[in-house]
Image (cartoon, helix red, strand yellow):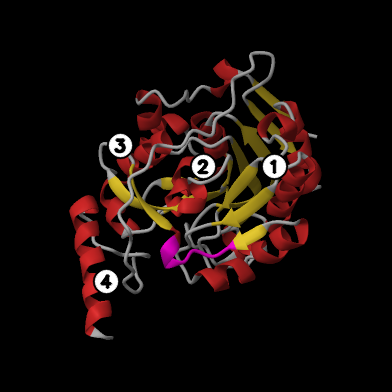
């Protein structure tokens, strides 16, 4: 590296360290990247509440596309959430180099259908992306999500160094941190988690899936995982949460591996309240939401309610 380029990069790193206090890690276990410090305003992607509609809808159907469509229509349909000309970012869980059958990543079938729904509503652009744990190219290919999303008309973007903004998340634990710009520079954000066991937080569903908007050394957040999840949920409030409970990873999460650890549930949940979505979805793991640290803490922080029946719940078991 030439001296001039070294000085330029070192200057950027020093500036970043002053802003973030976290160094310049892109992923927690890979090479160094440099971020330009850029504090921007907190995004707001939520839609107005509608007292005539349920805020949480669950559908069970062996036809998973039909399950998604039914659950979505029950809370107002896609045109409630996406307007013509809007740019939409879809955030599935694509964290791991696993196949769809292993239930470590969101179903590619559901991701593809969500892309089609957004395009049908008139979205000007639909982006599908995630900050993965394993190598991004392998995760998107092996999961089947890249192929499904692109065939449906989305632009699939793998994170690169210039795609991160240092943002003030204004949390108790999470303050200045690198955030993938596609989750900020958009009109609508659709969170598409899968229901699965997690060795540290007991479960990973909607709120925990938001880890995938972050760069930096995310493994450091595991030391206070409940608070970090609440900080993320307070910062990034999606337009819509679509929970994949078609295949549920009961053990060995978050990576999974063994098909023996997967239960087939054929279920999709759509919600405008992410706390309630997690509270209902965690039941597929045989757990109670009022015993899960980050869900309890999210309710205490005023981010939603655990008792999803209080906010309007609709269930279609087929």
Image-based side of 171 in relation to 124, left or right: left
Q: CA distance from mark 1 to mark 4?
A: 48 Å
Q: Is residue 199 above or below residue 45?
A: below
Please tell me which of labels 2 and 1 falls first in the chain. 2
Between marks 1 and 3 in the image, the one whose residue lies nearer the viewer? 3
Q: Quadrant of the N terminus?
A: bottom left
Task: Residue at 57%, 66% (x, y): give it.
Answer: 258
Membership of 160 in magenta stretch: yes
Which labelled disc corresponds to residue 206? 2
Q: Is residue 161 above or below residue 154?
A: below
Q: CA distance from mark 2 to mark 1?
A: 15 Å
Membership of 295 in magenta stretch: no
Picture mark count: 4
**Mark 4 falls on what kind of element?**
helix
Task: Residue at 52%, 69% (x, y): give it.
Answer: 136
- The local crowd at label 3, few if under 14, some if 14 to 19, many if 20 or more residues have their Cα within 10 Å, is some
- The local crowd at label 4, few if under 14, some if 14 to 19, many if 20 or more residues have their Cα within 10 Å, is some
Please tell me which of labels 1 and 3 falls first in the chain. 3
- Residue 292 visible, this angle: no
- Residues in magenta? 157-162
**Mark 3 falls on what kind of element?**
loop
Percent position of residue 86, x then y: 65, 40
**Mark 1 falls on what kind of element?**
strand
Which labelled disc corresponds to residue 267? 1
Image-based side of 170 in relation to 131, left or right: left
Q: Quadrant of the C terminus?
A: top right
Task: Residue at 33%, 41% (x, y): give it.
Answer: 169
Please tell me which of labels 4 and 3 falls first in the chain. 4
């Amino acid at each position: 590296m030439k001296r001039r380029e070294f000085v330029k990069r070192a200057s950027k790193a020093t500036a970043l360290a002053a802003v973030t206090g976290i160094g310049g890690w892109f992923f927690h276990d890979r090479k160094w990247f440099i971020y330009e410090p850029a504090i921007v305003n907190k995004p707001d992607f939520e839609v107005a509440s509608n007292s005539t509609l349920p805020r949480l809808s669950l559908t069970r159907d062996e036809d998973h596309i039909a399950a998604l469509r039914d659950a979505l229509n029950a809370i107002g349909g896609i045109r409630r959430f996406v307007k013509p000309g809007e740019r939409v970012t879809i955030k599935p869980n694509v964290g791991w180099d696993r196949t769809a059958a292993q239930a470590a990543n969101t179903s590619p079938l559901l991701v593809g259908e969500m892309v089609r729904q957004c395009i049908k509503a008139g979205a000007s652009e639909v982006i599908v992306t995630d900050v993965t744990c394993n190598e991004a190219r392998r995760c998107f290919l092996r999961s089947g999500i890249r192929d499904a999303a692109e065939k449906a008309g989305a632009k699939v973007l793998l994170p690169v160094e210039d795609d991160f903004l240092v943002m003030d998340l204004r949390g108790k634990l999470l303050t200045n941190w690198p955030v993938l710009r596609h989750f900020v520079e958009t009109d609508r954000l659709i969170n598409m988690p899968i229901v699965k066991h997690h060795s540290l937080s007991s479960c990973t569903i909607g709120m925990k899936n938001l880890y995938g908007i972050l760069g930096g050394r995310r493994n450091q957040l595991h030391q206070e995982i409940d608070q970090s999840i609440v900080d993320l949920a307070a910062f990034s409030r999606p337009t819509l949460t679509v929970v994949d409970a078609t295949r549920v990873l009961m053990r060995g999460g978050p990576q999974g591996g063994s098909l023996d650890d997967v239960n087939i549930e054929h279920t999709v949940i759509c919600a405008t309240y992410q706390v309630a979505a997690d509270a209902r979805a965690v039941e597929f793991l045989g757990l109670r939401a009022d015993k899960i640290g980050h869900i309890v803490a999210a309710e205490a922080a005023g981010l939603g309610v655990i008792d999803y029946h209080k906010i309007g719940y609709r269930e279609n078991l087929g």
